[in-house]
Amino acid sequence: MTAPGKVSEEASPVKKLRVVMAQLDFLVGDIPGNTERVIQAAREAWQEHQADIVVFPELCLTGYPPEDLLLRPSLGIRVSDAVEQLKQAKLEPAIVVGAPVRSGGLLYNAALVIEDGVLVGKYFKRCPPNYQVFDEKRYFAEGQNAKVLNIKGVQVGLTVCEDIWADGPVEDAAAAGAQLILNLNASPYDIDKQARRKALLERKAANNNVSIVYVNLMGGQDELVFDGGSMVVDHSGTLAAEVPQFKEGLFPVEFLCEHHCQPVSQLPCPEPSLEANVYNALVIGVRDYVNKNGFKSVVLGLSGGIDSALTLAIAVDALGKERVRAVMMPFRYTSSASLEDAEAQATTMGVQYDVFSIEPMYDVFMKTLKAPFEGTQPDTTEENLQARLRGVLLMSLSNKFGSLVLTTGNKSELAVGYSTLYGDMAGGFDVLKDVPKTLVFRLSRYRNTIAPVIPKRVITRPPSAELAPDQKDEDSLPGYDTLDAILHLYVERDYSAEAIVAEGYERADVERVTRLVDINEYKRRQAPIGVRITERGFGKDRRYPITNGWKIGK
């Protein structure tokens, strides 16, 4: 018998709540298509998982980042139409979606909750970020208040992306009685990012005694790649569920909610290697850039060197061999090893392969330039001409067949200007733009563990542009181990030249490398975009003036 005034345990059973994390890839600007994707996913989450709540990524209705599309006058009309469509769909689960919402004359990055065809709540992101690749303060006002809603009988707090990295939003939601916090994200990938996310979520959950559902976007958008990696951390700070990175899907998690909402733990994901993670990011970046922009195929120059070899492997893995064309464009300095290795890889990977010598074109150009060049000595001008002739060939194939030209330069080369404007920089997308040369070697070895497609000699012989007799990269640059270490400190960590010397590097190397980085900003501004995999790539991350009087040193 139950004592007067008491409620039996049988009368108040533990509340079960099934949350589905919708780790999906959305197309920026395609509001109708993204809205339909949300509806289909919510219905699938109900049919397959009997979801109570489906949580989507940040700004999923517009895609992320929408950039100046947010300034279009019709944005509000399109988003309102999308929200109305979601309400009229009468979905079984409650859905939590991200969208830009205007209120009081200001635009906010919002999380919207729709349940039983009704917009039951909205939360405005309180901490729009303005660093690295983010410039949300250009568009969004700051939300002011926490939001806790009763969804399916559970007190649920809402936060959006950067809110969880700052102090305040999680703490306020927990203080307002949230048993569970949903965090909508568009957090781009960089090396080791997932480890930082886990550590943060574990600390936030434990400190605030509340479980957190972290749902992240998946897919490529221009230079950014979103890796997913959605997860759930319980109120003690223990990781209870983690979704594989770079995988789209609907991922359910069961909660038992009483005083706390305790997730039912799932088996942990295998920890991928750094090389596997980066390789996946590059593949997704290429696949989404090509497909979302409507290119039928890609074409690239296959030189017999390691950069183009790795680029070819990534392109085939992203698009399939039928959509990839490789072109060898030999000259008198091209070695027999390069010719043999390029053909061997193209044959192994089954791509269309052509060989077009640039020798006849070079001779015509030099004949034309004979008079103005009279009395001068051969120098980098003649070397650059070779690269530019190859660029003309590739761009001609691009124009004729609608193929996107993939350039093959790596981050180390781009940093110091070891590339030719309108030559090997001519193209639409640079797959390795943010990949240091030392990592190029590691990724090539990793790819060969899946299937040996890159000839061993390509990986083992000294890198060379083959623009002059017996040329090697390290004739004019420090060894790549040294070069990449200096570049990491200067470009990604903002060390001064003096600080890098203090780390034990030769002053001559440091001063030469840092000077090359500075004077080649004008080249990088004209380079194609490429996949960002580090905390600071050449693109949105690093915005240095071309014309400036800053001197290296302290």
Image (tube, grey):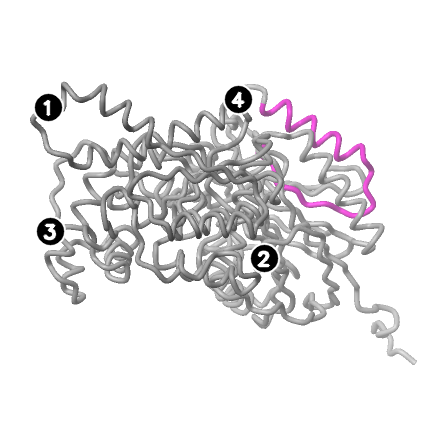
Q: Is residue 361 magenta?
A: no
Amino acid under label 2? Gln
According to the picture, the residue beneath numbered tag 2 turns out to be 245
Q: Quick check: 419 left or right of 282?
A: left
Sort mark 3 into few (<14), some (14-19) or many (20+) by Cα contacts within 10 Å: some
Q: Is residue 89 magenta?
A: yes
In the image, residue 495 sits, relative to residue 401, either above or below, namely below
Residue appearing at x 19%, y 53% in the figure: 475
Is residue 95 visible to us here?
yes
Image location (x, y in percent) of residue 478: 20, 57
Task: Give the mark, 1 or 3, whose residue is nearer the N terminus.
Answer: 1
Q: CA distance from mark 2 to mark 3?
A: 41 Å
Image location (x, y in percent) of residue 130: 39, 42
Q: CA distance from mark 4 to mark 3?
A: 45 Å
According to the picture, the residue beneath numbered tag 1 turns out to be 374
Amino acid under label 3? Gly
- Numbered label attached to residue 357: none
Between marks 1 and 4 in the image, the one whose residue lies nearer the viewer = 1
According to the picture, the residue beneath numbered tag 4 turns out to be 72
According to the picture, the residue beneath numbered tag 3 turns out to be 553
Q: How many marks?
A: 4
Q: Are marks 1 and 3 in contact (CB under 8 Å)?
A: no
Q: CA distance from mark 1 to mark 2?
A: 59 Å
Quarter of the figure that contains the N terminus: bottom right
Amino acid under label 4? Arg
